[in-house]
Image (spheres, helix red, strand yellow):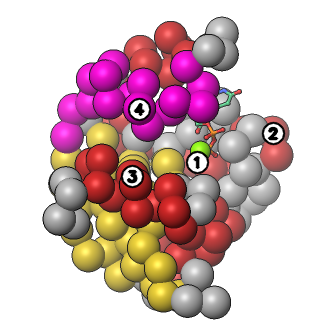
Amino acid sequence: MAKERTYIMLKPDCVKRGLIGKVIARIEEKGYTISNMKMMNLDEKILREHYAHLVDRPFFPEIVSYMTSGPVVGMIVEGENAVKGMRIIMGATKFEEATAGTIRGDFAMKTTENIIHGSDSPENGEIEIKRFFGENA
Ligand code: UDP
Ligand code: MG
């Protein structure tokens, strides 16, 4: 295990439902450090990069419409094993598999509107941090 950085993003449903504080509390209670954070509005161009693995899926237009429906909060989260650790406290992608006690399991009832994004590998974490916070982040 190593100290890692991961890109975390609180999605529009998290912001609209007033859950920013609750989700951040879980990240901090776990022991991770939030080293940078900003609110922003995404466009289709950046979503096509960020979700490049999904652009050909039939539900991609739904993702774009959801992710552009309001502001998101992007964060750099740091700590031991932060990439995998955040995925554990986030919960599974499919809403029916996200167990109680996880962020998605406790706060989401849909697969698309699922509160939070977290990088899936340390390499992708660094790519995503640069995508949203710039080359020098
Ligand atoms: N998504 C969806 N339907 C699916 C799979 C994914 O709407 O069948 C959305 C969902 O919001 C998910 C995002 O696309 O969080 C990215 O999918 P990925 O497979 O990368 O899941 P994640 O890494 O977010 O768990
Ligand atoms: Mg993913």
Kind of residue at badge 2? Glu
Query: Could you give the CA–CA distance between mark 3 and mark 1, rounded to whole angstroms?
Result: 24 Å
Numbered-mark total = 4
Q: CA distance from mark 2 to mark 1?
A: 12 Å
Residue that carries the numbered disc 3 in the rendered image: 128
Q: Disc 3 and disc 2: Cα gap in Å?
A: 27 Å
- Residue 58's image quarter? top right
Find residue 49 and name its label. 4
Q: Amino acid at mark 1?
A: Phe
Q: Please, is residue 81 above or below residue 107 in the view?
A: below
Q: Nearer the viewer, mark 3 or mark 2?
A: 3
Residue visible at 33% across and 19% down?
A: 44
Q: Are marks 4 and 3 in contact (CB under 8 Å)?
A: no
The N terminus, quarter of image: bottom right
Indicate which disc, 3 or 1, sits on the residue closer to the N terminus: 1
* Residue 48 appears left or right of 62: left
Q: Earlier in the sequence, mark 3 or mark 2?
A: 2
Secondary structure at numbered mark 1:
helix
* Residue at the spot 53% in from the left edge and 76% down from the top edge: 82
Disc 1 marks which residue?
107
Q: Is 49 included in the stretch rendered in magenta?
A: yes
Residue at position x 82%, y 46% from top?
97
User: Sequence order check: which comes first, mark 2 or mark 4?
Assistant: 4
Mark toward the start of the polypeptide (1 vs 4):
4
- Which dot marks residue 96? 2
Q: Is residue 24 above or below residue 105?
A: below
Q: Nearer the viewer, residue 5 or 117?
A: 5
